[in-house]
Amino acid sequence: MKFGHKYTSLINWLEQAGKTKAILSDSLTYDNNKTKRLDLLNTILKLPTARAKYIKADTFNLHSPVIINLIKELGGSRKKYSFRIAPQATSASAFPIIKKYGLTFAQFEKYLKKSRLPKDQTTIRITDYRNAIKYAAIVIVSPAGIIGEVARGTLYHLTYSVPLKSGDRITTFYKTPDGRLTLVNPTPELNTLAATVINYLYLKNNQVKQKLRRQGFRIHGRYLGGYYEYVEGADGDGVFTDMNLKKITTNINVKAVIKTLRRQVDKDKSLLTGLPVNPAPKIVTGNVQLINDQTINKFRPGNILLCKRTTASYLPAMKRAKAIVTELGGLTSHPAIMARELKIPCLVGIPGVTKKLRDKTEVQINLMDGTIKTID
């Protein structure tokens, strides 16, 4: 997989954007310890979590006792799995992190043999593959409250801005420490999903809270703090696939996001409205430039970058943009995270905006309520 692919890892986005070694190291550390954290939460809190196993690439051999036993432990040779290939080094610069989904061990071994990866420097994480995922959620629990996103789809729809089915859209929600759960553009099923995920993180037992604190987890009120990813099948069988305290995922101004969402709950639905990624500056005025994968190199510095969705190859243009407006994606998508890191005003998740705004149109973006107005 080359850099710029639509499923490029966030760590590779960060490195390509020239972020500091401290941020990269922080992200890699949390990624490498993901399984340990999830196992602890499963043991202490009985949180439903995805199983994962690690193995060095140069020891991956279907005939070795280690792999034979691993296949038996995970569920058999005919079953499909998810594979994540990453450098063992503390930097991701050796090669992009690669993710392969829905392969058997035999199929993955064929891929690995054909690849030119430095196998002696590579670690593989193997997890269960869920090909019947119906819902996905991302939740951030902070001292200022809880915010998150839910969708009828997979985590790819949230993190990589993959288009949802016609009529569906990402639903954002929030819960203040003393308030009730509120969803923007709610549906009964997504309301239930958001409540389910939040309830999993609610800590009733003080002894459990103390155990979690001793293991380094943060507690905010009665909730387990941090960033969470969750998927659920049509049968209601759901698992948490990630929990972390990365600076890159928890540096969201939750208080400001909740203020914006409160404004959007009762807003005029005829307005072009998205979710502001950066609340400052409050107002941005400029000409939009509509781009896609083929025209990204033609982006002119100082314009407002307008597109359906971004991939990592859009980074050079993102850096030169006065602001970014996307049709797809949400608060926790990789492009939104990068816009926060680059300190560029950004609105995400505006249905049909690439058709409703014409190229070179002068617009005014209100970062306080997420609206866009054309200037005559």
Image: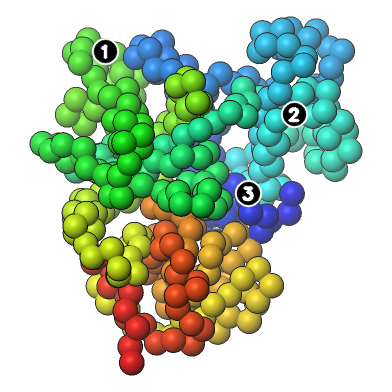
Q: Are marks 2 and 1 in contact (CB under 8 Å)?
A: no
* x, y percent for residue 102: 70, 30
Residue at the spot 67% in from the left edge and 55% down from the top edge: 5
Secondary structure at numbered mark 3: loop
Disc on res. 7: 3
Q: Identify the image quadrant of residue 91.
A: top right
Q: CA distance from mark 3 to mark 2?
A: 17 Å
Which residue does the numbered mark 2 point to in the structure image?
Answer: 103
Amino acid type of the residue tagged 1 in the rendering = Val
Does any portion of residue 21 appear in the rendered image?
Answer: no
Disc on res. 120: none
Amino acid type of the residue tagged 2 in the rendering = Leu
Q: Is residue 298 above or below residue 275?
A: below
Neighbor class of circle 3 (other Cα within 10 Å; few <14, some 14-19, many 20+) is many
Neighbor class of circle 1 (other Cα within 10 Å; few <14, some 14-19, many 20+) is few
Please state if 132 lies on the left or on the right of 252 as rendered.
right
Q: Sequence order check: which comes first, mark 3 or mark 2? A: 3
